[in-house]
Image (tube, grey):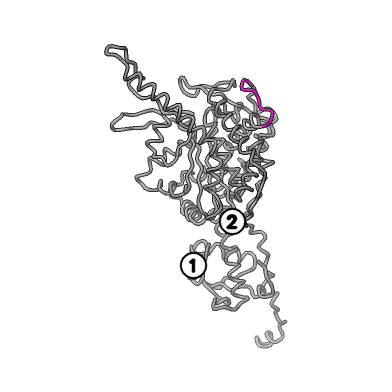
Amino acid sequence: MTARDLLSNAPEVGLEEVWPEPEALDGLEVPTLPSFDALKLLPQPLGPWAVDTAERMNAPVEFTATAALVALAGVVGNRVLVAPDPEADPDWLEAGNLWGLLVGEPGSKKSPVMERAFAPLHAIEAELHRENQRALDEWEIDRRTRKKGDPVTEDDLHPPAERALLCHDITPEKLADLLEHNPSGLVTFQDELLGLVASWERPEKSGERQFYLKLWNGLSPHTVKRIKRGSHYLPMCTLSLIGGTQPGPLRRYILEAAKGWNNDGLLHRFQLLAVSELGEYRRVVKSPNTLQADYSALLYNLWQITTHGLSYPQVELRPGITRPVMTFAPEAQELYLQWQEQTARESRQASTPTLKRSLLEKQGGLVAKLSMLLELAGRWGDSGREAVEDSRHHIRPLSTARAIALANLYRDHALYTWWEAIRPEIQGAHALAKRILERTQTRSAFTYERFTVRDILRGNWKGLTDPGAVERALGELEARGWLRRDGKAWIPNPRLWEGSHA
């Protein structure tokens, strides 16, 4: 029997035997934004204020809640600390400061929301300004009326220290000066935060970048070296920070950061990263706003209480510097340690991308901070506010559960934002699948029967501009039967024409 005879007698090979049925891309899941239930996640009056303010301002509740948390963190600063695991690591302490980032398109009310959330802090700052002016006036009077030969102290030679809480549009040098006289911490917000962060990439700004990394830590010392005025030692540097940015510039910054330059974890320190799509406009008319007064009273009460000291167990951080410390109640401690163990296991898996690992490693401190802040807000924010002399220093399970839920939510928002950098092949596979289906269904000029990586790069499509990322995306689609490699070219599965598989 000849070869021709064999071929003529061979059974006809159908399309289904040459090409497999393309798999759905469900396994290539892209993160979605979880909903933010502020009434469940935040105690009184933070939750109701966040919801009510979002409705009145036609703004995302993710933004109002996040700005309120950073304002709360700014009021507490390092005036109260939390010990996350005193049994295993008694030296591990966390201050109450937080860094947040609001990500939204123009018109999403980022700046107005921050202004509204920080209104009570402006009132505190105005009170401090009046006190500063009175102290300065008294110093001036003493200086002018001092007679020759009167004893002079060191305090008599210099104006009184400037007390502050809120700072805005400030240089690092001035910020260091304020922290020298306000060691309990400061809080600030920036309308366009990414511009400030991006400026730290310049070589001449490396010192400023390192200074801000210490400010995030909250309890690190810092030495300020001045040519004319000598060096000053700051025993603690604490700053709460929030700002806004747009998705496009942030995406470009994240993709650059993923390449490894200056990979010191700066991006991951914005742990309260909230993203919101631009929704439809809705005008809401409501009854007079009483929740703003409740919210302002909470922040002012906490400012007064923490400034004058709480009768909690004390820890000495530096010689002569002590702070009250909160710990978890037994049930809350168990809840925290269970979550911490699960997070640590996920972080240490070999398959966990580096960017995600860096995020997870910092969440233990975040949950402890949030637990402390929510506990303080719950105690003095409810209708039955605790007395100032209350000595209970334990964090209750409800505050811990809320903190864990918040940390998980902000983690999902961060992963949604970083996904293109963490798993570019997933994003690229979805983008390429969409393009292939569009081209195969419309029979456009795209050579759908056979194409190369170069053909894709010429399209300059979002998520498909890097050759390596395109190759990985093609590999993902090949593994699911969408494509087949033919030398340097790729051939789409003709079965895609039978229906949508995206």
Q: Point out residue 232 in the picture as x, y percentages from the top left corner.
A: 36, 28
Range of the magenta residues?
382-389
Query: Residue 483, can we see it?
Result: yes
Task: Provide the secondary structure element on which disc 1 rests.
Answer: loop
Distance in Å between CA atoms under marks 1 and 2: 26 Å
In this view, the residue farthest toward the front is 288
Quadrant location of the N terminus?
bottom right
In this view, the residue farthest toward the left is 148
Please name whichever residue, 122 or 435, is drawn nearer the observer in this view of the structure. 122
Query: Residue 403, can we see it?
Result: no
**Residue carrying label 2:** 278
- Quarter of the image holding residue 346? top right
**Residue carrying label 1:** 460
Question: Quick check: 448 left or right of 164?
Answer: right
* Mark 1 neighbour density, 10 Å: few (under 14) some (14–19) many (20 or more): few
Magenta stretch containing residue 385, yes or no?
Answer: yes
